[in-house]
Amino acid sequence: MPWKRILIAAGALSAVALLVLVLWPAALAVDGAQLSTGAMQVTVDDQGETRSHDRFVLSAPVAGRLARIALHDGDAVGENQLLAQIAPLPLSRRELDEITARVASAEAIEREAQQRVRHADEDVAQAGREYQRVRKLVQDGFMAPQAVEQARNLAVTAASEAEAARFRARAAAADVKVAKSGLGGLRAGAQAAGSLVPVRAPMAGRILRIPDASERVVMAGTPLLSIGNLGGLEVVIELLSSEAVKVAPGMPVLLEGWGGNQALRAKVRRVEPYAVTKVSALGIEEKRVNVIADFVDPPGAIGDGFRVTARIVIWQADKVLKVPASALFRCAPAWCVFVVEDGRARRRSIEVGQRNLGEAEVTGGLSAGQTVVRYPGNDVTDGARVRLREKL
């Protein structure tokens, strides 16, 4: 009997232990990360575009027929090299008659102004003689003293009107010169209608783009081609105005996504003082500010108008305690993490300094070597049993 009881009791205890083992909650599998010290950077990231610092858009100086441009995009050109030729259009009779009439009108106005000057000079002379007579009569006692003041006022007024008339005559003479210069330009254009007007390169560089190299009739001011110096490339980065206020000249820039294996170094030269309104792909109006950066490393095969991904370093340190940003979560006004201690998750309130997309600087509450839970879910609570997943 005692042995039977012992066996029954042992079986019952085994069943209870097996039931407890089955119903006991398993430890949560979590991803962990060990805190360490190292270098850290905080950057402002956005898309940028390269452009030639010295870029010129050459336009047609006159209206006429453009001869076919024999050059191509990317061709090297020298300073003052002939790039295009334009045959000016012949003048119309209406244009010549219009300018001639303007000259005749300006000359008539000038003659009228000259006559007014002579009339004003006569009035000045007459006022002077009248002033002398009145002054003599007042001295002899035949007129009141107020008459001298009135005569003097009339003389001064006449002199002022004569001076104003002379200024009007000068303005009329200047208008005549302007009208005659227009007529001379038309006559010179008519004489040059059979010749070609050259378009030359203002600097040595490369042709960036020729919109249309075909022979055609162009108006004055029509863009013909763009020329630039690819040895002086710069990067234009369009930042949100809320991000641009964090950037200052001299900050380092890392250029990625340009097609090479390594990031190229650049440096911020200028933050433009005005913002422009841009509409995003989602239809949201944004205020964008251009940040101009100069290459520090050679740009290599990068040309004008190439797109890059720019990372502007606004803060960096060589040795800081870092925690993955995926381990942080808000707890009241502070930041918290779950620290793995003896197989359990312990919530800790920490102090955070600088942050970027992947890491955050820990200024208090943690120490190097501790393990924190990454991506904590709602089932991870203070004191919960956890186990770390094995890293693949």
Image (spheres, grey):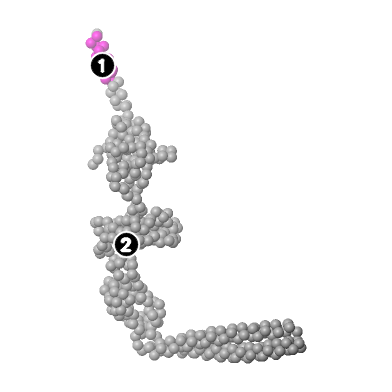
Name which quarter of the figure residue 256 lies in. Answer: bottom left
| Residue 10 located within the stretch drawn in magenta | yes
Helix, strand, or loop for circle 2? strand
- Mark 2 against mark 1, which lies toward the viewer? 2
Q: Residues within 10 Å of mark 1 (few under 14, many from 20)?
A: few
Q: Is residue 366 above or below residue 67?
A: above
Instruction: Identify the residue shown where x is 30% and y is 56%.
Output: 254
Q: Name the main secondary structure of what is drawn in magenta.
A: helix
The CA distance from mark 2 to mark 1 is: 82 Å
Residue at numbered disc 1: 10
Percent position of residue 28, x then y: 31, 34
Q: Residue at x 57, y 90 (%)?
A: 114
Q: Check disc 1 and give the amino acid type.
A: Ala
Q: Secondary structure at mark 1?
A: helix
* Farthest residue, direction right: 142
Given residues 274 and 372, the one toward you in this image is 274
Task: Check disc 2 and report the residue beneath it.
Answer: 294
- Split into 4 quadrants, where in the image is the C terminus? top left
Report the quarter where the N terminus lies: top left
Q: Nearer the viewer, residue 376 or 52?
A: 52
Q: Which residues are magenta?
A: 2-15
- Residue 316 point in image, percent of width and height: 32, 50
Foreground of the two, 104 or 306: 104
Is disc 2 in contact with disc 1, using a CB cutoff of under 8 Å? no
Q: State which tag comes first along the sequence, 2 or 1.
A: 1
Residue 95 at least partly seen: no
